[in-house]
Amino acid sequence: MSMINELFELTGRVALVTGGSSGIGRAIASALAAAGASVVHAALEQEEDALQEAVTQVERSGGKADYVTCDVSRFDALPGVVEKASSVFGSPDILVNAAGVNLREPWDKVSEATWNKTIAINLSAPFFLAQLLIPAMQEKGWGKIINIASLQSMRAFPNSAPYGASKGGVMQLTRAMAEAWSGNMSGITCNAIAPGFFKTGLTAPLYDDQKVIKALAAQTIIGRNGELEDLNGLTIFLASRASDYITGQTISLDGGWTAK
């Protein structure tokens, strides 16, 4: 294997991917498995059929995968999630926080329950999951945390105040995680991917209106919306040795949307 290939090799690594039953989480999990990592998909219990399909897809491609069911908004259950995930392939040294929710309500209709649920899943869970996994990463002297930010980490969109607040928080949380855990030659990095518009469960309602989708594509420089395969390269980069000197960064994967 060449030196360059070794930089991106993930054989022997273990990844825990929340939101791993569909959309961006599932695509990221597949990319990590293709690069050699053993992957544990995590999602809600009602997503178990989709989790099984995701695992089967990885295994058919020659990868190693399993799944755990969890509600990441239940912080008291997170230690059990980490314990179950660690019992499969060993303690995860890659954590991808891809679980997310956007309830899309006008600002005057947002309830306390909506606000709290959005912040819990999108912002709080990534911190508390990482907090649980960091000691084992420190012991190994290697770890990669990848958060999922958003266009709304930097831009405001209608009917998404809680989501925008949570994703703006993810961008700053990524910096704070890096400050807390990347020092003293720990071997741990914390970065975020900020996707543009990809067709996922969260954005599916938008795809019912092709005029809207074409308008969104026109907002990019490249001229199209994202395909899930576009996540592969950046995911493997941030999860591998190739990114060992990058931490605290949010990288936009948006076809140039935020550059215009």
Image: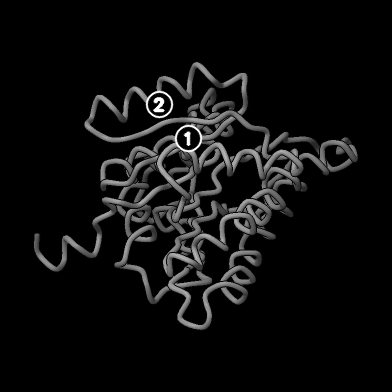
Relative to 176, 14 lies left or right: left
Crowding at mark 2 (Cα within 10 Å: few <14, some 14-19, many 20+): many
Compared to 242, does 27 lie above or below? above
Residue 157 can be seen, yes or no: yes
Compared to 202, does 155 lie above or below? below
Circle 2 residue: 54
Task: Say whether marks 1 and 2 touch (CB < 8 Å).
Answer: yes
Residue 181 in the image: state x and y as whole percent. Answer: 57, 72
Residue, x 61% and y 39% (percent of image)? 81
Q: Amino acid at mark 1?
A: His
Give the image quarter of residue 28.
top left
Q: Quadrant of the N terminus?
A: bottom left
Residue 237 in the image: state x and y as whole percent. Answer: 33, 60
Residue 83 in the image: state x and y as whole percent. Answer: 58, 42
The local secondary structure at tag 1 comes to strand
Residue, x 69% and y 43% (percent of image)? 121
Mark identifier at residue 41 = 1
Foreground residue, 79 or 65? 79
Foreground residue, 145 or 109? 145
Residue, x 43% and y 70% (percent of image)? 141
Compared to 246, does 231 lie above or below? above
Compared to 84, does 223 lie above or below? below
The local secondary structure at tag 2 comes to helix
The tally of labels here is 2
Residue 220 in the image: state x and y as whole percent. Answer: 43, 52
Relative to 115, 258 lies left or right: left
